[in-house]
Amino acid sequence: MHLVRDVLDKELLDREEEPMGRVDGLIMQLGERSQPRITHIVVGGATLWERVHPAFGRLSRRMSRWWGPKRDKEVRIPWSRVKTAGRDIKLDVEGKDTGAIDWELWIAHHIIEHIPGSGHEEADDGS
Amino acid sequence: MKKILQITLGIVTSVGGFLEIGSVTTAMQAGASFGYQLLWAVLLGTLCLIFLVEMSGRLAAVSKHTIVEATRERFGFPFFFIVLIGMALVSFLVLVAELGGIGLALQILTGVGFPWWAIPVSFVVWVMMWKGTFSLIENGASMLGLVTISFVVAAFKLHPDWGTAAHGLLPTFPDDKKANYWFIAVSILGASISPYLMYFYSSGAIEDEWDETYIPINRIIAGIGMSFGGFLSMAVLIVAALVFHPKGIDVEKFEQASLLMTTALPKWGFTLFALSMLFACFGAALEISLSIAYFFAQGFGWNWSEDLTPSKDARFCLTYTVIIMAAAIPLLFGVDPIKVTIISMALTAVALPLAIAPFLFLMNDPIYLGEHRNGWLSNTVVTIVILLSFVVAIIAIPLEIIGS
């Protein structure tokens, strides 16, 4: 498998096949005696912007401190949760438990659901 | 039977959705200033668009990726980010122009100035996006756009000299106003080869769940639909050549442009022109707003589908909401939509390589298309037209600015 061609930037799907972002970064462990191995997938935030320019990474960190869902740590998903890697990367996780869709939920909750007709009322009735 | 229905619907929506403020304005300018002489630019632009739209559909049908998704995955985020910035800026300007076009159409129908329409128009577009489904936007808006066929009726009723018109299909050098000639040629190419149309089409193919069995259907829809669309643009140019060119009328004034069809259709010409602009720009505004939101959502891996309720794809909906609101602002201050149109069409031509170059690489990549990758013909046609547009654009735009 080519990491950059087949993993980096691919779409991530959770257990329910719901999109939960893209592979924005990878974390590799270098052992003294063992082969290097990929341990985590990083989703969103400063890691992504740092790939464009370090200044963008700093800006992203600063922005997330005063606006949006508060998180101290970046979203890391253990590589062991990868089920398949093909057209997209399927993970054996629940999207909202990982923190990867914090922004999606935050925007839905703080902005979209305040606008009439956003559909969350119907969802509430159904449950 | 179902496939025949799909093909018919696909062609009808392509025709209804083809014209928008860019193609109408540039074709009118060309006809008014140079007679039939610039028909070749419409032909060349349409030809290139046929190839590009066919490719967008084929990529989606075979790889199940939209252009945006494949661009990010194959070229990585930093490169994708540059394309995102370029396309978002150009598409945003085109959206301002389309919303302005709706405003201008309402202005000539009601007498109330277009800045007053900026907020109501943006609101209606936004409500359609918020509550509508993908097929409502794709089919409903384009069906209304079929009123633009009235341009063809007008062209036939004026009995043009078809032989002379046919000469315009071959490029010739102008005798005077050279800078203006090439500037309009570039604007026509920019207006015909709209990148947002490719993003919209490939996302639509994913929304409609196309697979490899759709390759022939896709070819027919792209070929016939876009050809008929090109005929509509040519009809606008021909009518302008017959009505405006002899009198030397300047079409940068919208009130004068609105008289385009009154010679051919004295009774209904004025209303038909206004309605054509209204529906054509309305459909385009919806498609562009959706395309920009698709671009962000697909690039960042957010939930996206026009068929989901907004609370299920919050970031996608927030994107188009912000963009539609922002596009209304320049119009509120009375920025001339025709000027925005002319600038954005020329800029589109400059930005084309940014959108098309990575797309061509993808279309030749066996990882994405396997045996269905591009042949030499589509590669050659698209490369030549895009390079030509780019080169002429960077020469003609500064000359036009100096000239005016």
Image: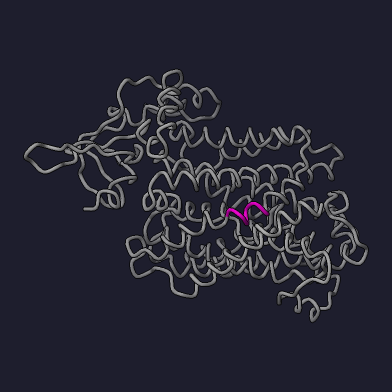
In the displayed structure image, the side of residue B51 where residue B300 appears, left or right: left
Quick one: B176 or A111, which is closer to the camera? B176
The residue positioned 52% from the left and 70% from the top of the image is B220
In the displayed structure image, the side of residue B269 where residue B284 appears, left or right: left
In the rendered image, residue B133, in percent from the top left (x then y), is placed at 53, 44
Question: Picture quarter containing residue A24?
Answer: top left
Looking at the magenta stretch, what is its main secondary structure? helix
In the rendered image, residue B282, in percent from the top left (x then y), is placed at 67, 46
- Up the image or down, B328 lies above or below A86; here it is above
* Residue closest to the far right: B247
Question: Picture quarter containing residue A78?
Answer: top left
Question: Is residue B109 in sight in this rendering?
Answer: yes
In the displayed structure image, the side of residue B7 where residue B79 appears, left or right: left
Quick one: B275 or B348, which is closer to the camera? B348
Q: How many marks?
A: 0
Magenta region: B346-351
In the rendered image, residue A27, in percent from the top left (x then y), is placed at 23, 37
- Up the image or down, B303 lies above or below A103; here it is below
* Residue closest to the far bottom: B163
In the displayed structure image, the side of residue A31 where residue B17 appears, left or right: right
The residue positioned 32% from the left and 61% from the top of the image is B367
- Up the image or down, B324 lies above or below A88; here it is above
Question: Does the stretch in magenta take in B105?
Answer: no
Question: Is residue B151 in sight in this rendering?
Answer: no
* Residue closest to the far left: A33
In the rendered image, residue B164, in percent from the top left (x then y), is placed at 81, 79
Question: Picture quarter containing residue B191?
Answer: bottom right
The residue positioned 69% from the left and 46% from the top of the image is B98
